[in-house]
Each structure stands twice: as structure tokens, then as C-alpha cells.
Image (cartoon, rainbow, N blue to C red):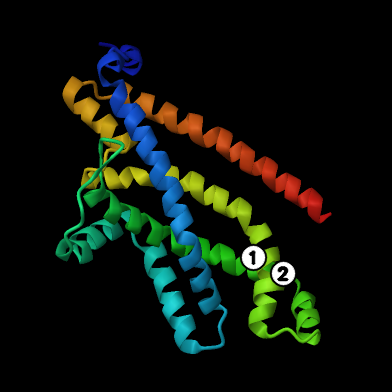
Amino acid sequence: MSLLQRMTDFSFLPDYLPYFTNGLLCTLLISFLSVMAAILPALALALMRLSKSKVLRGISGAYIEVFRATPILVQLYIIYFGPFNAITLPSYKLFGFIDTSILIPGFIALALNSAAYVAESFRAGILAVDKGQTEAARSLGLTQAQTMRYVVLPQAIKNIIPTLANELITMVKETSVIGYLGVQELMWGTRTTVGATFLPLSPYIFAAAIYFCINYPASKAVEALERRMRRGDK
């Protein structure tokens, strides 16, 4: 069989398409939940990083550097075989095929990893707010906490929204690692199909096409959002 034939042999689809559709549903669900769950820890880390306390800055900095400097697969295994090895989680089939006992550790690992990256985006967004805004708010009698809550954060979040959208796009691809725990996401379905059909190439090409059809339009939408927000600033 030639290379072109191996690349275009999609005879597996009638029997194995549910692996891809179910995997896609699982991938999108975990991606969205992981990024949403990362927002509050990321905001806390960013505020700690900007704190005057050396202890808080040190804790936040250490967390961010560790999670950004180590592979996500290693983090996944440490979390799954570490803390969650001593915890018995309820096993429930979400949507009939997603086992919550292995979904939860994978989801938490992705959220903790995402928080390290989103925290830096929050910090950059906060620092991007003009210092005159803070000085004006403090001169009006607002406390530091009130200034951050009512003046700085609303403007910072506007700057961060495109970054969060980009993080969501990135997470769609990074969810592939939790398939190694047995979570039936898109790459798990692809590897299962390859093992059952002995087709080493076309299932991966089909999976790549699915990822592309999700991420390319999403990235263009984020670019349009960024241009729209820049026009609003002008």
C-alpha cells in the first residue's frame, strides 16, 4: 500500500466513528472546564505575585515556575499516582462513557497547569492598567482592595479575555495527555482505532483534521476579537 493510500484509507470510519465523536465531546468539555476552573486560582496567584509580601510572592513564583518548567504529562502522573492514589473517587459514567474516577484527576491536573499560565496573563493585564487609575481611585478615598476590585480588575479583565480564549484553544490540544489515564478523549479514541484496525496513519490524519477544524476557526475568532478590542481602545 502506497503512502497516499495509507493516508487516505478511511475505511475505519463506519465502525469507529463513535470513538471520534465521543472523544471530541470529552475533549471540548474538559478543555472548557479546565480553563474556567483555572481562572480563580490564577487570579489569586497573580495578586500574590504583585503583593508586597515576600512570602506570598515566593509561593506564587515557585508555583508558576514549577508548573511552567515541567512537562504536563509528568504533572498528570504525579497528581494521579500521588494525592489521588490515596483517594477513592466515585465512579460514574458521564454521558455513558466518561469515567469520573479518572476524569477528575486529569481535569484537576490540567486546571492546575493552566492556572500557572493564566496567572501570568492576569499579572500582565493588571500591570497594563495605567497607574493614574489607581492613584485617582485612592485619592477618592477607595481602599487598596476596593481600587483593585472596582477600578483595576475590570480594565485588566478586558485585556485578558483574548488571552483566555487562546488558552482555551491551547487546552483543546493539551487534553490529549489525559488519554494516557484512560479518559476517552479524542486521542484515546484515535489510538484505540489504530490498535484495532492496524491502520497506522489515516486515523491520526482524521484526528488532526478534527483538531484543525476546531482550532483554526477559533484562532481566527480570537484575532477578530483582539482587533475589535483595539479599536475600542482607540
**Residue at x 69% of width, y 72% of height:** 150
Instruction: Compare residues 56 and 38 and report the one nearer the observer.
Output: 38
Across the whole image, how many numbered discs are drawn on residues?
A: 2
Q: Provide the residue designation for mark 2.
A: 129
Q: Position of residue 192 (x, y in %)?
A: 22, 30
Left or right of 220? Residue 37 is left
Q: Secondary structure at mark 1?
A: helix
Where residue 3 sits, quadrant-wise, is: top left
**Residue at x 74% of width, y 50% of height:** 229
Where residue 64 sits, quadrant-wise, is: bottom left
Q: Categorize mark 1 by other alpha carbons within 10 Å: few (<14), some (14-19), many (20+).
A: many
Instruction: Compare residues 34 and 9 and report the one nearer the observer.
Output: 34
Q: Position of residue 202 (x, y in %)?
A: 32, 21
State whether residue 173 appears in this view. no
Position above or below: 105 against 46: above
Instruction: Compare residues 72 and 218 and report the one nearer the observer.
Output: 218
Position above or below: 129 against 182: below
**Which mark, residue 125?**
1
**Residue at x 51% of width, y 36% of height:** 215
Left or right of 146? Residue 231 is right
Which quarter of the image is occupied by the N terminus?
top left
Q: Are marks 1 and 2 in contact (CB under 8 Å)?
A: yes
Q: CA distance from mark 1 to mark 2?
A: 7 Å
**Which mark, residue 5?**
none
Amino acid type, callout 1: Gly
Q: Secondary structure at mark 2?
A: loop
Q: Position of residue 106 (x, y in %)?
A: 30, 52
Amino acid type, callout 2: Val
State whether residue 148 appears in this view. yes
Where residue 28 sits, quadrant-wise, is: top left
